[in-house]
Amino acid sequence: MPEISVKIKDGEAQTFQQGITAGEALKKLVSNKVRKTTVAAYNNGVSVDLSVSMTEDAVLEPLVMKSKQGVEILRHSAAHIMALAVRKLFGNDVKVAIGPSIEDGFYYDFDRAEPFTPDDFELIEKKMEEIASARLPFVRKEMKVSEAIDFFDKQGEKYKVELLREMDVETVSTYQQGDFVDLCRGPHLPDSSWLKAFKLLRVAGSYWRGDEKNPMLQRLYGTAFYDKKELKKYLNQLEEAKKRDHRRLGKELSLFTIQDQIGPGLILWQPRGALLRKLIEDYWKDEHYRNGYELLYTPHIARQDLWKTSGHLDFYGENMYSAMDIDDVKYQLKPMNCPFHIGIYKSNKHSYREFPIRWCELGTVYRYERTGALHGLLRVRGFTQDDAHIFCRPDQLEYEIFNIIDLNLHILKTFGFDQYDIYLSTRPEKYVGSDEHWEMSTEALKQALDKKGLTYQLDQGEGVFYGPKIDIKIKDQLGRSWQCSTIQVDFNLPERFEMTYTGDDGLEHQPIMIHRALMGSLERFIGVLIEHYAGAFPLWMAPEQARILNITDDQYQYSEAVYSRLRNLGVRVEKDLRNEKLNYKIREAQLMKVSYMLIIGEREKGDGTITVRKRNGENLPPMTPAEFAEMVNSECKEGTGETN
Ligand SMILES: [Zn+2]
Ligand SMILES: [Zn+2]
């Protein structure tokens, strides 16, 4: 038998007989310790099963449990095992669609007449455990597409057949486990015994291929970890997340409402939510003004021709709402603010001396989202971007990016986020603009990140077609990641709109344009804030900083006077002067996450003071309303970093 030479990266090559499996070869190449955590392998960079036969010289790398792909393989394999369990329990009438791993877990879509119930979950989990202890291997087989179509057709697997018919390849691979054969690329765990810690989470309706015209399938969600402790931690976190769900808290705290009569994905801000939003907006505007930005306001609709020029109609049309006729001219709702800011730019001539121009706007845009994708404040159809556009010269780009990152991180920190992951995305395959421009601006983004001393992940080829970008994902209290900030260089729009400025050489040049959103959108960001703080906002953005609670009707007048006095002193105060027991009123204020309760009885009335009770139950010594206002205001200044 011919021999092949296999080595691990930076290791010494060893000779093996051709046909040896990757798993066997790795046994010789890596330590026992590593091998025990190896679930698959990279064969010349391609991920493969450990059972794959090696046919040529190769660099082999162990694919270990703790790697991102190692976890994906576990979860994806768990989806197969779940499908096998469902088949064993409910028979071959259940048709299977697709079953990928996703962030935090996996799912499988089933076509079954009966709905899955919580009782079924237990049965399925039990069956999966049985399968796991049976140590069933995943047996790979390659076949021609036509063969595979025949095979799955005979089994009545119409979804697999549909997928196969659309494939533009000659051969596909199937994996058999027990008597269940699935169409899959792999790789998988060596066998089912690796599945030790898993849990079925929920079932949801899901249209085949996400299309509402297709049959509704049942999507079973689950998660899996290599370690039982990690699973437990994750399940606890899910419980905590449920308690913090912004849709639930939004209702309980009267922050916002979404109503069918108005339309899905459209947010109605209730007074408390509106106040919260105003506080965030005010802070945002002030902070931008301090950092050399100017504020813009632009309309919500524009002529369709504008969207043709900007390219939105071509590239983004399916996210835009249909046109309306105004005086026989077509108009459309804006999905983005950029062309309007360009319009303002073009309303004057510009010279290099004016640069950089930094313009910001809390601009409300409208984008189509499928009904099924809508989710509270996080996924909506009308939302307000915290948008900004910077126009500058090439030599200013790096500093501007540095500045944006600086402001960005500062504002995020004020909101309580100081953990984040940063991604730098570079030129994709299809792009506009010159190579020189791309290199220069990618370099500027890198330099700015380096100068800030920030670590980032390079996403090669993941940039937008019009320029490189930086994305910042923030981490909340529960360690969950949220994509919020994005900084994008754009060579496309300045070209399309023929934007110019006069350089120091007296000639016309094209400015560099940067798009930037920091929170992403107010809706989404507030959704994240609600969950981050579980509704108990820091004092500076709390819509209700204090609530006055009188003990009896005898303090009614005095309470009213304190209320007016505090409002005048800038405290966001409410009053609960109902003829109810004090404890009852305190409990209600606590449920509404009010920061301070101001209790007024006969003594306070006599002394001209208030007794201040913190949300956690701690009482402060009695103080005058003026003293309280001063305390609140200085605590707020500290919160927004305005102390010095
Ligand atoms: Zn698979
Ligand atoms: Zn823009």
Image (spheres, grey):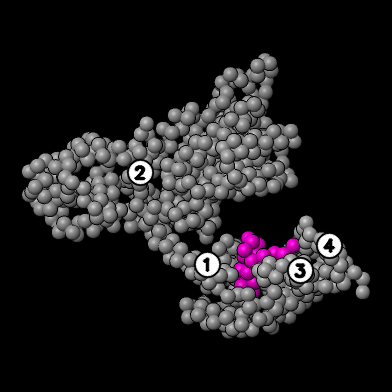
Amino acid of disc 4: Ala
Q: Which mark is residue 541?
A: 2
Q: Select label 4 or label 2 by which is in front.
A: 4
- Quadrant position of residue 567: top left
Q: Quadrant of the C terminus?
A: top left
Evaluate if marks 4 and 3 touch, with contact meaning CB atoms under 8 Å apart. Answer: no
Q: Is residue 347 left or right of residue 540?
A: right
- Say what secondary structure mark 2 lies in: helix
Q: Quadrant of the N terminus?
A: bottom right
- Quadrant position of residue 76: bottom right
How busy is the neighbourhood of tag 3: few (under 14 within 10 Å), some, or many (20 plus)? Answer: many
Label whose residue precedes the other's in the sequence (4 or 3): 4
Q: Is residue 453 above or below residue 225?
A: above
Q: Which residues are magenta?
A: 61-80
Q: Select label 3 or label 1 by which is in front.
A: 3
Q: What residue is shown with label 3? A: 26
